[in-house]
């Protein structure tokens, strides 16, 4: 970066701005940035740049300290004006355009890269092999996570190519379970901001904060307040790892452009004493704001988002605590394009698995009984979508279908005698039954064919519970969905061993294949990454303005259709992640079709082949050729 500390700098910037032409043309690119301006790319050559530089600026082989930066104190302020050239050394520091050793000979001449790189020119594929070799040498998952973050910050396209081509190996690195540990230690590993942090300090100025983000064509925002990160609890500002990870998957798995994705953390404090006393914690050191103060900040944020990015920007709420998650979804679903992945995304992916599992256990959704351990966002969200799909299939009222679904929370089975003390989102699941205090007793009296864990509490599907499920089900369906792996209700090995190999098992975080009595069992993963990237792509390509339950059902249907007989023969109720971009295209097409059917699409006319259209809209990370 060249700093111009002379009176001629403003003259050059005015001339550069007047010349404003898109960067990447036939002549050299110059990027001028000053104050709050977003900067304009222009074409000029080096002689013109030098002509506007003060000769004094090169006295003694260096630059004159005209602004006194080297002599400044905290009381003597310095204005950080800079002028940067979009070629040469700066190009190698720009993660959006850097290609490292893959710059061709012609590009190295055209963009002043001679001497800044070793003489060898390599392909993107060779870079990929080299990086995967390096990553595999790390034994600690968090080291791999940090290495991937570093790669994303220096070469964005290579990061996404690595993730797309090695998705089954790297998904657990950039997302669950490793992202949980990364959030816990985010203050220690923090290097560069990867999104926007909006705290109580920004109250009244949130629109201005959004304008500080360098990209204005944002299509998807993932936002968290960090209060319920996975099964790890309140991680405050350090929950930023979740929106960053989710949006990496939006691009890698769903094909949304990286520049269209914006991670945001709302910092209202934390009640985590360990973080409040941690010298490396990066958030507000205060207790969480509640009530009106919290509501006002979130309302200002939602209004500012619509004002800045328009009606069609998708806002995905992520890892909010129950008492806020349901209220936010209810409040803004009628005025904004919003989606809660914990409530709706989890529900959609689990429903898809249950539709697929019917090919193994027989019957319809309405023929089975469901018992949940956990009655929070995920549990009640899944239960409601199952009941909704039963109603759609049978034409019966949703209230009637809810009676086939039972939930257990920390106080036991949710029954009608507890109605007055229940939170509003649990009340539809309070059925007539005598009180039952624990999960084992609930399994014995309800006799479910499907057991689903969304409790966030590990080791709660005990041997007694699993063996009881197996005692009255030939093929018990056991879904241990809590993340990360340490919080899973049981392991794959436990499920297969305790049921003598008869269980149909899936989990939230990945487990390795299990050998039992000479047979290999491959556990499925009910990962939200199957659904939300395709759902988001479908909403974007159709120009949707609202999210309806019918779109979630359409996403589930499309995912279930991608499960092959070969997958089922292995006991898998989800397709392999290696084909996730194809799966996401089909989900996006099905969702978009439903958006058009409901009259909520703004991109008209409707494309004839939505699958091909979705595929054509997907970002690909192959390197571009620079002129």
Image (cartoon, rainbow, N blue to C red):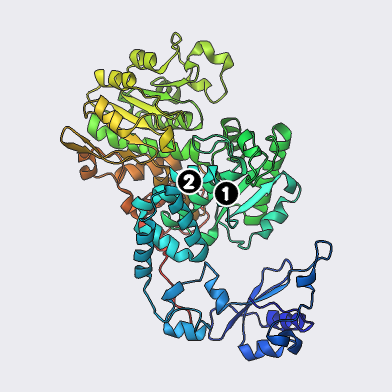
Left or right: 502 as drawn, with respect to 89: left
Residue placed furthest toward the left: 518
Residue 433, above or below 77: above
Residue 615 seen in the current view: no
Residue 149: percent from the left, percent from the top?
49, 57
| Residue at (51% x, 71% y) in the render | 97
Residue labelled with disc 2: 179
Which quarter of the rendered picture does the N terminus lie within?
bottom right
| Residue at (75% x, 71% y) in the render | 70
In the image, 87 versus 363, the foreground residue is 87
Tell me the element at label 1: helix
Residue placed furthest toward the top: 434
Residue 242: percent from the left, percent from the top?
52, 46
Q: Which mark is residue 93?
A: none
Of callouts 2 and 1, the N-terminal one = 2
Q: Residue 188 carries which label?
A: 1
CB contact under 8 Å: marks 2 and 1: no
Residue 627: percent from the left, percent from the top?
48, 82
In the image, 244 versus 418, the foreground residue is 244
Distance between mark 2 and mark 1 Cα atoms: 14 Å
Q: Quadrant of residue 193?
A: bottom right
Tell me the element at label 2: helix
| Residue at (55% x, 70% y) in the render | 93
- Judged by depth in the image, the label closer to the viewer, 2 or 1, is 1
Q: In which quarter of the image is residue 437?
A: top left
In the image, 565 versus 41, the foreground residue is 41
Q: How many labels does the image show?
A: 2
């Amino acid at each position: 970066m060249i700093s111009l500390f002379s009176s001629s700098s403003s003259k050059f910037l005015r001339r550069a701005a007047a010349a404003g032409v898109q960067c990447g043309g036939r002549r050299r690119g110059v990027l001028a940035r000053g104050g709050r301006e977003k900067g304009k790319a222009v074409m000029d050559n080096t002689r013109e740049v030098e002509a506007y530089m003060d000769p004094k600026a090169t006295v003694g082989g260096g630059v004159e300290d005209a602004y006194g930066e080297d002599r400044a104190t905290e009381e003597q302020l310095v204005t950080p004006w800079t002028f940067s050239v979009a070629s040469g050394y700066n190009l190698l520091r720009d993660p959006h355009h850097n290609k490292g050793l893959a710059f061709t000979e012609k590009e190295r001449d055209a963009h002043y890269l001679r001497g800044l790189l070793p003489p060898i020119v390599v392909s993107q594929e060779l870079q990929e092999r080299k990086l995967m070799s390096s990553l595999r040498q790390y034994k600690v998952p968090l080291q791999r996570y940090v290495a991937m973050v570093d790669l994303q910050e220096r070469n964005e396209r290579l990061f996404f190519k690595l993730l797309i081509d090695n998705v089954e190996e790297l998904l657990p690195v950039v997302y669950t379970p490793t992202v949980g540990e990364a959030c816990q230690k985010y203050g220690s590993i923090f290097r560069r901001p990867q999104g926007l942090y909006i705290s109580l300090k920004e109250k009244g100025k949130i629109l201005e904060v959004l304008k500080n983000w360098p990209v204005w064509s944002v299509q998807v925002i993932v936002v968290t307040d960090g209060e319920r990160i996975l099964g790890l609890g309140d991680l405050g500002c350090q929950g930023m790892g979740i929106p960053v990870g989710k949006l990496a998957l939006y691009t890698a798995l769903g094909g949304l452009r990286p520049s269209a994705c914006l991670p945001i953390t709302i910092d209202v404090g934390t009640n985590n004493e360990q973080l409040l006393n941690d010298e490396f914690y990066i958030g507000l050191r205060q207790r969480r704001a509640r009530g009106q103060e919290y509501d006002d900040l979130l309302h200002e944020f939602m209004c500012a988002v619509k004002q800045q990015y328009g009606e069609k920007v998708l806002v995905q709420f992520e890892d909010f605590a129950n008492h806020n998650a349901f209220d936010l979804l209810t409040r803004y679903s009628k005025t904004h394009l919003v989606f809660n992945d914990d409530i709706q995304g989890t529900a959609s992916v689990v429903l898809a698995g249950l539709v697929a599992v019917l090919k193994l256990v027989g019957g319809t959704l309405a023929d089975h009984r469901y018992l949940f351990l956990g009655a929070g966002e995920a549990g009640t969200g899944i239960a409601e979508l199952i009941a909704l799909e039963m109603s759609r299939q049978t034409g019966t009222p949703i209230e009637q279908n809810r009676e086939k679904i039972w939930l257990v929370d920390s106080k036991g089975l949710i029954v009608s005698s507890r109605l007055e003390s229940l939170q509003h989102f649990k009340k539809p699941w309070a059925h007539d039954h005598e009180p039952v205090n624990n999960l084992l007793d609930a399994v014995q009296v309800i006799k479910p064919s499907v057991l689903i864990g969304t409790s966030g509490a590990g080791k709660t599907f005990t041997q007694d519970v699993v063996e009881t499920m197996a005692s009255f089900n030939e093929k018990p369906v056991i879904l241990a969905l809590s993340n990360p792996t340490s919080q899973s209700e049981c392991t794959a090995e436990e499920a297969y061993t305790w049921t003598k190999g008869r269980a149909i098992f899936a989990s939230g975080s990945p487990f390795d294949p299990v050998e039992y009595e000479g047979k290999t069992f491959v556990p499925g993963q009910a990962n939200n990454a199957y659904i939300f990237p395709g759902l988001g792509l479908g909403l974007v390509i159709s120009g949707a303005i609202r999210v309806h339950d019918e779109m979630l059902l359409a996403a589930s249907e499309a995912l279930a259709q991608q499960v092959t007989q070969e997958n089922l023969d292995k006991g898998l109720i989800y397709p392999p992640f290696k084909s996730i971009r194809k799966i996401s295209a089909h989900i996006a097409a099905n969702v978009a079709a439903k958006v058009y059917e409901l009259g909520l699409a703004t991109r008209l006319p409707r494309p004839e082949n939505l699958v091909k259209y979705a595929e054509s809209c997907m970002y690909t990370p192959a390197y571009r050729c620079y002129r």
